[in-house]
Image (cartoon, rainbow, N blue to C red):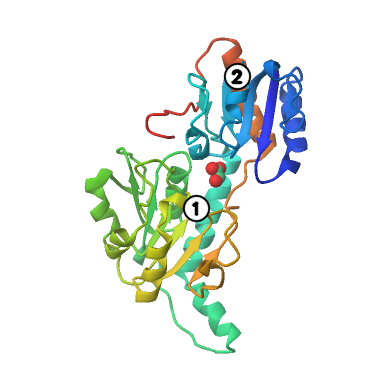
């Protein structure tokens, strides 16, 4: 029973994953993509952004596990082996990281910390007060495994919290909107938007000028979903016009963000390097072992991706 590991960003992640997987599944032969051995023996793949075509080279693959929550790069592979189930990562440590990131940046926008930082650099003592959380509406786009707990946490801080998702959801303390029809109400009056959606054909380019125009003037945006959801020229235009007053972006159309990209030095843009949350091998390995054991016992897999909807 062999598993192949591939991570585009950081090949050094192999050893921690191997160690964590061996602890829960001692019989699993965990191999790096650099030394795959006999590829006919590979039954499982654990991958982050594999090059298109890579997974198609393993003739006996039984399941593909994503290291991350988002599976867009896997589903965009035209040679993804047909009929092999793909599972996304739904891990508490990953969710917790996204919740922390969202809280940090919602509060930062709420208290206008970017302006305080700018004033500090100009040695400018300029005091102002912020509304209370209860007077601020925060909107969370995506109410699934990550967005749901985030919306709850934001609501727990006292913000008027509204959520938007593809399908109807119910979350205590969160006003939930859904579908195309619910979008207008979701956006109107929402001063801080947090995007945690998966990238699918439906959410591609969703963060565009039409959406920004429905927000109150001077709203702020946090995107920790996927770069493919944001129209970057529209963000720059909205920042210039004042429609958006600041954006915090963890994801970009092109990653790593190219050195010449205007976002890097823009005074109204906060850039983080796609590190809002990173899956922890220790907790995630337990979930993977559970799924591998289920497959071996012919039981249905958990967190299997519905390829028709893209997550
Ligand atoms: C990170 O982007 C993830 O999909 O987990």
Residue 272 tag number: none
- Look at 60% across and 37% down and name the residue there: 51
- Look at 45% across and 48% down and name the residue there: 196
Residue 244 appears in the picture as rendered = no
**Which mark is in front, 2 or 1?**
2
- Look at 30% across and 68% down and name the residue there: 216
| Residue 112 image point, x, y percent | 47, 73
Disc 1: residue Cβ within 8 A of ligand 1's nearest atom: yes
Determine which quarter of the picture holds residue 170: top left
Judge by depth and name the residue closer to the eye, 1 or 132.
Answer: 1
| Residue 311 image point, x, y percent | 44, 34
Residue that mark 1 sits on = 224
Residue 61 tag number: 2
Cβ–Cβ under 8 Å for marks 2 and 1: no
Disc 1 crowd rating (10 Å Cα; few below 14, some 14-19, many 20+) is many
| Residue 70 image point, x, y percent | 51, 40
Determine which quarter of the picture holds residue 186: bottom left
Gap in Å between the C-alphas at discs 2 and 1? 31 Å
Residue 276 appears in the picture as rendered = yes
Asked whether, in this view, residue 97 is left or right of residue 37, the answer is left
Asked whether, in this view, residue 28 is left or right of residue 115, the answer is right
């Amino acid at each position: 029973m062999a598993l192949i590991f591939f991570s585009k960003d950081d090949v050094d992640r192999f050893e921690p994953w191997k160690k964590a997987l061996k602890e829960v599944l001692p019989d699993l032969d965990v191999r790096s993509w650099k030394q795959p051995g006999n590829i006919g023996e590979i039954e499982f793949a654990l991958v982050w952004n594999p090059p298109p075509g890579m997974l198609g080279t393993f003739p006996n693959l039984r399941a593909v596990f994503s290291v991350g929550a988002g599976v867009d790069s896997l589903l965009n592979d035209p040679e993804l082996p047909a009929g092999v189930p793909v599972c996304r990562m739904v891990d508490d440590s990953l969710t917790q990281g996204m919740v922390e990131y969202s809280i940090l940046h919602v509060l930062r926008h709420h208290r206008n910390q970017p302006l305080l930082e700018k004033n500090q650099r100009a040695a400018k003592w300029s005091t102002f007060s912020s509304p209370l959380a209860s007077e601020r509406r925060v909107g969370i786009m995506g109410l699934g495994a990550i967005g749901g707990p985030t919306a709850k946490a934001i609501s727990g801080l006292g913000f008027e919290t509204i959520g938007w998702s593809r399908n109807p959801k119910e979350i205590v303390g969160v006003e939930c909107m859904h579908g195309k029809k619910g979008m207008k109400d979701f956006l109107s009056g929402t001063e801080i938007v947090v995007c945690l959606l998966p990238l699918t054909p439906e959410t591609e380019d969703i963060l565009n000028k039409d959406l920004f125009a429905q927000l109150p003037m001077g709203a702020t945006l946090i995107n920790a979903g996927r770069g493919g959801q944001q129209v970057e020229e529209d963000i720059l235009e909205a920042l210039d016009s004042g429609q958006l007053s600041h954006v915090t972006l963890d994801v970009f159309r092109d990653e790593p963000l190219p050195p010449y990209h205007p976002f890097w030095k823009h005074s109204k843009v906060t850039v983080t390097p796609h590190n809002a949350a990173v899956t922890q091998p220790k907790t995630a390995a337990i979930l993977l072992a559970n799924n591998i054991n289920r497959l071996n016992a012919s039981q249905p897999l958990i967190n299997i991706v519905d390829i028709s909807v893209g997550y």
